[in-house]
């Protein structure tokens, strides 16, 4: 479908710190869009996009339905909405049923990105409890994409990265500090 990359990330407990570590270390000319699912309380507006935007060279914003993906922009799934990538490189929001007890779910985002971007999709599973992301990374890998997870030492909660590792499809298990440089290297190779 495309020959440009997308980076899709999922984080839960401890995610703000992990996302900040990665996004604040990406260069302002990062050549791919980034779509992020951070598990959030569904009943409160989220400030995560504003917080991360202040600490990143990239534009960080809450995703809106119909929005066209742009390089160097980070799209955060709004509370209580799944975030999906469409064939025309726009975003959709959905209130379909919860996946892995959560909405938004990384699995939903990863599976949509895998279908559209195929080998140009890079999935990143960060700190969190439960197993969200595990099914999604299998979809990414099946379509030829790349899978990165944060290592145990730098994850506040290792359940989500560990669930992804147990699938057997993970390409890189990295400390948080190494993920930004790895993303830059993969996209510029």
Image (cartoon, rainbow, N blue to C red):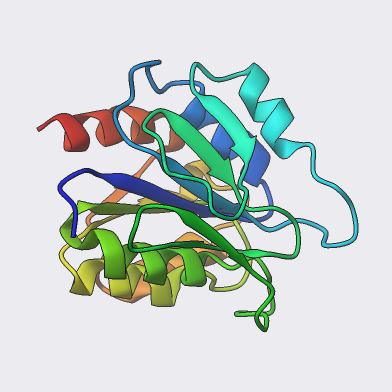
- Count of marks placed on residues: 0
Residue 71 can be seen, yes or no: yes
Q: Split into 4 quadrants, where in the image is the N terminus?
A: bottom left
* Residue nearest the viewer, comparing 165 with 119: 119
Q: Position of residue 28 (x, y in %)?
A: 40, 15
Q: Where is residue 169 in the image (x, y as percent from the top left)?
A: 24, 69
* Residue nearest the viewer, comparing 53 with 19: 53
Residue at the extreme right of the image, as rendered: 43
Residue at the extreme bottom of the image, as rendered: 97
| Residue 180 located left or right of residue 4 | right
Residue occupying the point 45% across, 44% down: 68
Residue occupying the point 82% across, 58% down: 41
| Residue 99 located left or right of residue 182 | right
Q: In the displayed structure, would residue 176 be above or below residue 136?
A: above
Q: In the displayed structure, would residue 58 be above or below residue 170?
A: above
Quarter location, residue 55: top right
Q: In the displayed structure, would residue 27 be above or below residue 158?
A: above
Quarter location, residue 47: top right
Residue occupying the point 20% across, 74% down: 142
Q: In the displayed structure, would residue 4 be above or below residue 84?
A: above
Q: Where is residue 101 in the image (x, y as percent from the top left)?
A: 69, 79
Residue occupying the point 61% across, 58% down: 128
Q: Split into 4 quadrants, where in the image is the C terminus?
A: top left
């Amino acid at each position: 479908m495309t020959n440009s990359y997308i980076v899709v990330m999922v984080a839960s407990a401890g995610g703000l710190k992990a996302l900040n570590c990665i996004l604040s270390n990406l260069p302002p000319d990062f050549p791919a869009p980034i779509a992020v699912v951070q598990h959030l309380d569904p009943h409160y507006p989220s400030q995560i996009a504003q917080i991360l935007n202040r600490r990143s060279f990239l534009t960080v914003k809450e995703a809106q339905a119909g929005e066209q993906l742009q390089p160097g922009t980070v799209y955060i799934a709004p509370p209580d909405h799944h975030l999906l990538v469409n064939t025309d490189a726009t975003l959709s929001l959905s209130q379909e049923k919860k996946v892995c007890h959560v909405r938004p779910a990384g699995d939903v985002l990863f599976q949509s990105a895998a279908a559209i971007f195929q080998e140009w999709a890079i999935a990143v599973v960060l700190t969190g409890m439960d197993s969200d992301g595990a099914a999604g990374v299998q979809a990414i890998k099946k379509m030829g994409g790349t899978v990165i997870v944060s290592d145990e030492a730098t994850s506040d909660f290792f359940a989500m990265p560990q669930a992804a590792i147990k699938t057997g499809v993970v390409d890189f298990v990295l400390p948080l500090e190494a993920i930004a440089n790895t993303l830059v290297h993969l996209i510029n190779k």
